[in-house]
Amino acid sequence: MNLLQIKKDLRKFVSKKRKKTNEWFFKTGPGEYGEHDKFLGISNPNIRKVAKKYKDCDLEQLQKIIISPYNDERFFAIIVLVEKFKLKKTTRNEKKLIYNFYVKNLKYVNNWNLVDLSAPHIIGEYILENKSERKILDKLVKSNFHWHRRVCILSTWAFIKRDDFDYTLKYAKILLNDKQDLMHKAVGWMLRETWKRDANICEQFLRDNYDKLPRTTLRYAIERLEEKRRKLFLKGEFL
């Protein structure tokens, strides 16, 4: 499997219009959260199409791609990685190798599309089955790199799906003081997912921490409330 061929196949789908759109959408302007990032201009469906063709890439080959300066190519590498992890035939040892590879390369998981695609499926699912690794979340939540903090809270989605909300609420509380709006959205999103499964426990968390809640987090968290109650909640008025 030739690295140059993979890159050539990806570039068949390059679009100048998509490039411009992605640069705007992922905030690559000076001082914006994605200032570091570059895009070739390939749509997600087309990246997935190429990833399906090269689904048998091994970790050595993916290592050469995940370090790319182009988000599109890193996205390709992460798709392949996630799909490998999710396969029923993937052994526990293979999952460990994928998890370790992912953690080693976390600095390249550095935009929200990359984090959201991978964190719940790799870190989240792995630490569910390997309790000794859960301490990684304590490290990530304190990171100065905001993408690491997003990895932390998104990883707890795997627990939410099993009706275990302790990790989400623990890290959500720590991240209420985060300065990044992207983190406010991520925390609100995970609280909303918690609300879907247990409205009472999520509502109690919001009540207990109401004075510290960023407005964005609150709005995301209570999206499922009927309009009347949602408006009251935004005013701090609870029924």
Image (cartoon, helix red, strand yellow):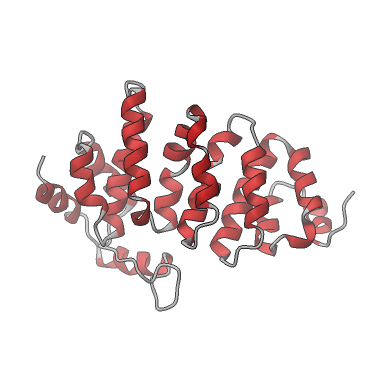
Q: Residue 162 is drawn in which quadrant?
A: top right
Name the foreground residue: 120 vs 93. Answer: 93
- Residue 208 position, x and y percent, is 80, 51
Q: Residue at x 51, y 53 (%)?
A: 150
Residue occupying the far right of the picture? 239
Tell me: residue 178, above or below residue 78: below
- Residue 112 position, x and y percent, is 45, 56
Name the foreground residue: 130 vs 49. Answer: 130
User: Does residue 231 appear to the left or right of 145 in the view shown?
Assistant: right
Name the foreground residue: 127 vs 116. Answer: 127
Question: Looking at the figure, which quarter contains the N terminus?
Answer: top left
Name the foreground residue: 148 vs 14. Answer: 148
Q: Residue at x 65, y 54 (%)?
A: 174
Counting every numbered tag in the picture gives 0
- Residue 21 position, x and y percent, is 36, 66
**Residue 192 appears in the figure:** no
- Residue 104 position, x and y percent, is 33, 47
**Residue 188 appears in the figure:** yes
Tell me: residue 104, above or below residue 16: above
